[in-house]
Amino acid sequence: MTNKYLVYTAMMTAIISVLGLVPPIALPIMPVPIVLQNIGVFLAAILLGRKYGTLSVIVLLLLVATGLPLLSGGRGGIGVFAGPSAGFLFMYPVVAYLIGLVRDIYLNRINFKILFISTVVIGVVFLDVVGTIIMGIITNVPISKSILLSFVFMPGDIIKAIIASVIGNVLLHHTRFKQIIK
Protein backbone atom coordinates (compact mmCIF):
# COMPACT_ATOMS: atom_id res chain seq x y z
CA MET A 1 0.00 0.00 0.00
CA THR A 2 1.38 3.35 -0.98
CA ASN A 3 1.07 6.43 1.18
CA LYS A 4 -1.45 7.84 -1.28
CA TYR A 5 -3.85 4.93 -0.81
CA LEU A 6 -3.26 4.91 2.92
CA VAL A 7 -4.44 8.53 2.97
CA TYR A 8 -7.48 7.77 0.77
CA THR A 9 -8.43 4.87 3.00
CA ALA A 10 -8.09 7.02 6.13
CA MET A 11 -10.11 9.81 4.51
CA MET A 12 -12.99 7.46 3.71
CA THR A 13 -12.85 6.06 7.24
CA ALA A 14 -13.07 9.64 8.51
CA ILE A 15 -16.00 10.43 6.21
CA ILE A 16 -17.91 7.37 7.41
CA SER A 17 -17.10 8.39 11.01
CA VAL A 18 -18.36 11.93 10.44
CA LEU A 19 -21.60 10.53 9.04
CA GLY A 20 -21.99 8.89 12.45
CA LEU A 21 -22.45 12.34 13.95
CA VAL A 22 -25.84 12.56 12.26
CA PRO A 23 -28.34 11.41 14.89
CA PRO A 24 -30.05 8.09 14.17
CA ILE A 25 -33.77 7.87 13.53
CA ALA A 26 -35.20 5.44 16.06
CA LEU A 27 -37.95 3.14 14.86
CA PRO A 28 -40.71 2.03 17.23
CA ILE A 29 -41.06 -1.38 15.56
CA MET A 30 -37.42 -2.51 15.79
CA PRO A 31 -34.27 -1.88 17.84
CA VAL A 32 -32.08 -0.91 14.86
CA PRO A 33 -32.26 2.79 13.91
CA ILE A 34 -32.02 4.37 10.48
CA VAL A 35 -28.49 5.77 10.07
CA LEU A 36 -26.62 7.72 7.42
CA GLN A 37 -23.33 5.80 7.68
CA ASN A 38 -24.17 3.22 5.05
CA ILE A 39 -23.97 5.96 2.40
CA GLY A 40 -20.31 6.29 3.46
CA VAL A 41 -19.84 2.55 3.01
CA PHE A 42 -21.34 2.81 -0.48
CA LEU A 43 -19.09 5.76 -1.35
CA ALA A 44 -15.98 4.03 -0.02
CA ALA A 45 -16.63 1.09 -2.32
CA ILE A 46 -17.53 3.24 -5.32
CA LEU A 47 -14.61 5.66 -5.01
CA LEU A 48 -11.85 3.35 -3.74
CA GLY A 49 -12.83 -0.04 -5.12
CA ARG A 50 -12.97 -3.41 -3.42
CA LYS A 51 -9.56 -3.41 -1.76
CA TYR A 52 -9.29 0.05 -0.23
CA GLY A 53 -13.03 0.63 0.17
CA THR A 54 -13.32 -2.55 2.22
CA LEU A 55 -10.20 -1.66 4.17
CA SER A 56 -11.63 1.74 5.12
CA VAL A 57 -14.79 0.06 6.47
CA ILE A 58 -12.75 -2.53 8.39
CA VAL A 59 -10.64 0.24 9.96
CA LEU A 60 -13.84 1.99 11.05
CA LEU A 61 -15.17 -1.20 12.64
CA LEU A 62 -11.86 -1.83 14.41
CA LEU A 63 -11.96 1.71 15.81
CA VAL A 64 -15.53 1.11 16.98
CA ALA A 65 -14.48 -2.18 18.59
CA THR A 66 -11.81 -0.36 20.59
CA GLY A 67 -14.52 1.79 22.11
CA LEU A 68 -14.53 4.91 19.99
CA PRO A 69 -18.11 6.21 19.68
CA LEU A 70 -18.07 6.46 15.89
CA LEU A 71 -21.39 4.85 15.14
CA SER A 72 -24.52 6.92 14.81
CA GLY A 73 -25.84 7.93 18.20
CA GLY A 74 -22.38 7.86 19.76
CA ARG A 75 -22.27 4.10 19.99
CA GLY A 76 -19.03 2.19 20.16
CA GLY A 77 -17.33 -0.65 21.95
CA ILE A 78 -17.24 -4.38 21.41
CA GLY A 79 -20.83 -4.72 22.67
CA VAL A 80 -22.30 -3.26 19.47
CA PHE A 81 -21.10 -6.38 17.66
CA ALA A 82 -23.38 -8.51 19.83
CA GLY A 83 -26.39 -6.19 19.71
CA PRO A 84 -29.26 -5.90 17.23
CA SER A 85 -27.14 -3.88 14.76
CA ALA A 86 -24.44 -6.57 14.59
CA GLY A 87 -25.70 -8.04 11.33
CA PHE A 88 -25.51 -4.70 9.59
CA LEU A 89 -22.04 -3.98 10.99
CA PHE A 90 -20.67 -7.36 9.94
CA MET A 91 -22.19 -6.91 6.49
CA TYR A 92 -20.60 -3.48 5.90
CA PRO A 93 -17.21 -4.88 4.76
CA VAL A 94 -18.94 -7.54 2.64
CA VAL A 95 -21.11 -4.91 0.96
CA ALA A 96 -18.11 -2.62 0.42
CA TYR A 97 -16.17 -5.47 -1.15
CA LEU A 98 -18.99 -6.52 -3.48
CA ILE A 99 -19.88 -3.00 -4.63
CA GLY A 100 -16.17 -2.28 -5.02
CA LEU A 101 -15.78 -5.45 -7.07
CA VAL A 102 -18.47 -4.30 -9.49
CA ARG A 103 -16.81 -0.86 -9.62
CA ASP A 104 -13.42 -2.43 -10.36
CA ILE A 105 -14.81 -4.69 -13.10
CA TYR A 106 -16.62 -1.82 -14.86
CA LEU A 107 -14.18 1.00 -14.00
CA ASN A 108 -13.38 1.90 -17.62
CA ARG A 109 -17.04 1.99 -18.62
CA ILE A 110 -18.66 2.94 -15.31
CA ASN A 111 -21.87 4.94 -15.35
CA PHE A 112 -24.70 5.87 -13.02
CA LYS A 113 -26.82 2.87 -14.03
CA ILE A 114 -24.12 0.32 -13.16
CA LEU A 115 -23.36 2.05 -9.86
CA PHE A 116 -27.02 2.44 -8.93
CA ILE A 117 -28.05 -1.13 -9.76
CA SER A 118 -25.09 -2.65 -7.91
CA THR A 119 -25.61 -0.39 -4.92
CA VAL A 120 -29.33 -1.17 -4.72
CA VAL A 121 -28.92 -4.92 -5.15
CA ILE A 122 -25.91 -5.29 -2.86
CA GLY A 123 -26.06 -2.25 -0.57
CA VAL A 124 -29.80 -2.02 -0.09
CA VAL A 125 -31.48 -5.39 -0.63
CA PHE A 126 -28.65 -7.70 0.44
CA LEU A 127 -27.53 -5.53 3.39
CA ASP A 128 -31.03 -4.89 4.69
CA VAL A 129 -32.30 -8.44 4.36
CA VAL A 130 -29.24 -10.11 5.89
CA GLY A 131 -28.91 -7.40 8.56
CA THR A 132 -32.53 -7.75 9.67
CA ILE A 133 -32.36 -11.56 9.62
CA ILE A 134 -29.38 -11.43 11.99
CA MET A 135 -31.21 -8.79 14.07
CA GLY A 136 -34.17 -11.16 14.23
CA ILE A 137 -31.96 -14.04 15.38
CA ILE A 138 -30.44 -11.86 18.12
CA THR A 139 -33.81 -10.48 19.26
CA ASN A 140 -35.80 -13.74 18.79
CA VAL A 141 -37.95 -12.48 15.93
CA PRO A 142 -39.02 -15.05 13.33
CA ILE A 143 -37.07 -14.89 10.06
CA SER A 144 -40.21 -14.21 8.02
CA LYS A 145 -41.02 -11.17 10.15
CA SER A 146 -37.37 -10.04 10.00
CA ILE A 147 -37.47 -10.07 6.22
CA LEU A 148 -40.65 -7.99 6.29
CA LEU A 149 -39.00 -5.56 8.70
CA SER A 150 -36.14 -5.09 6.21
CA PHE A 151 -38.56 -3.25 3.92
CA VAL A 152 -38.70 -0.42 6.47
CA PHE A 153 -35.09 0.50 5.63
CA MET A 154 -35.30 0.19 1.86
CA PRO A 155 -36.93 3.50 0.80
CA GLY A 156 -34.33 5.57 2.66
CA ASP A 157 -31.52 3.29 1.56
CA ILE A 158 -32.57 3.64 -2.08
CA ILE A 159 -32.26 7.42 -1.68
CA LYS A 160 -28.80 6.88 -0.15
CA ALA A 161 -27.90 4.63 -3.10
CA ILE A 162 -28.98 7.35 -5.53
CA ILE A 163 -26.86 9.95 -3.73
CA ALA A 164 -23.81 7.68 -3.55
CA SER A 165 -24.20 6.67 -7.21
CA VAL A 166 -24.51 10.27 -8.39
CA ILE A 167 -21.47 11.41 -6.37
CA GLY A 168 -19.49 8.35 -7.44
CA ASN A 169 -20.40 8.72 -11.10
CA VAL A 170 -19.50 12.42 -11.15
CA LEU A 171 -16.18 11.90 -9.38
CA LEU A 172 -15.16 8.79 -11.32
CA HIS A 173 -15.68 10.72 -14.58
CA HIS A 174 -13.97 13.89 -13.39
CA THR A 175 -10.57 14.29 -15.06
CA ARG A 176 -8.80 15.61 -11.97
CA PHE A 177 -10.22 12.87 -9.73
CA LYS A 178 -9.05 10.21 -12.22
CA GLN A 179 -5.53 11.64 -12.01
CA ILE A 180 -5.57 11.74 -8.23
CA ILE A 181 -6.96 8.25 -7.70
CA LYS A 182 -4.59 6.46 -10.16
Image (cartoon, rainbow, N blue to C red):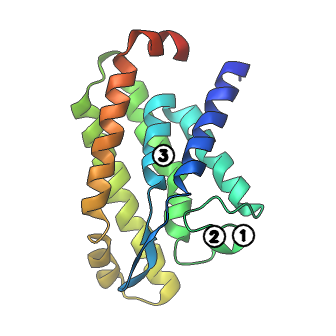
- Asked if marks 2 and 1 touch (Cβ < 8 Å), the reply is yes
Q: Secondary structure at mark 2?
A: helix
| Residue 20 x/y as whole percent | 55, 57
Label drawn at residue 81: 2
Q: Check disc 2: other Cα within 10 Å, few if <14, some if 14-19, many if 20+.
A: some
User: Label for residue 78?
Assistant: 1
Q: Check disc 2 and give the amino acid type.
A: Phe
Which is closer to the viewer, label 1 or label 3? 3
Q: Earlier in the sequence, mark 1 or mark 3?
A: 3
Kind of residue at disc 1? Ile
Amino acid at dot 3: Gly
- The spot of residue 171 in percent (x, y) is 39, 23
Residue highlighted by disc 3: 40
Q: CA distance from mark 2 to mark 3?
A: 19 Å
The residue shown at (21%, 33%) is 113
Residue 51 placement: quadrant: top right
Residues packed near mark 1 inside 10 Å, few (<14), some (14 to 19) or many (20 plus): some
